[in-house]
Image (cartoon, rainbow, N blue to C red):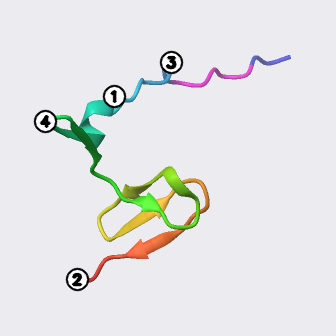
Amino acid sequence: MAEKPKAKGGPPKKKASRKLSALYTVSGERIECKNKSCPKCGAGTFLGIHNDRVVCGKCAYVEFSKK
């Protein structure tokens, strides 16, 4: 029986993770979040920023930005 050819490639590459400090600003004793929170899910669930829209990863809520 013939042997199957092996798949080319190596182990999957790790993506550089985004630092948590990039999502918040500290001014004095106040800490503020840069991203908006989702209006459907409530506080604690933030909207991801894309080129032309902001999206909630939990409930798929979308707000399109004006050009």
Kindly identify which residue carries mark 4: 28
Q: In the rendered image, which quarter contains the C terminus?
A: bottom left
SS majority, magenta:
loop
Which residue sits furthest bottom? 67
Residue 7 percent location from the top left of the image: 60, 25
Q: Nearer the viewer, mark 1 or mark 3?
A: 1
Q: How dense is the environment of label 2, judged by Cα within 10 Å: few (below 14), some, or many (20 and up)?
A: few
Is label 2 in contact with label 4 (beta carbons under 8 Å)? no
User: Does 3 appear in magenta?
Assistant: no
Q: CA distance from mark 3 to mark 2?
A: 41 Å
Amino acid found under the numbered disc labelled 4: Gly
Q: Nearer the viewer, mark 1 or mark 4?
A: 4
Kindly identify which residue carries mark 1: 16
Quarter of the figure with residue 49: bottom left
Residue drawn where x is 37% and y is 69% of the image = 53
Kindly identify which residue carries mark 2: 67
Residue 1 vertical position relative to residue 46 in the rendered view, above or below: above
User: Does 5 appear in magenta?
Assistant: yes
Q: Nearer the viewer, mark 2 or mark 4?
A: 4
Which residue sits furthest front? 29
Residue 35 vertical position relative to residue 28 in the rendered view, above or below: below
Q: Earlier in the sequence, mark 2 or mark 4?
A: 4
Residue 52 percent location from the top left of the image: 32, 71
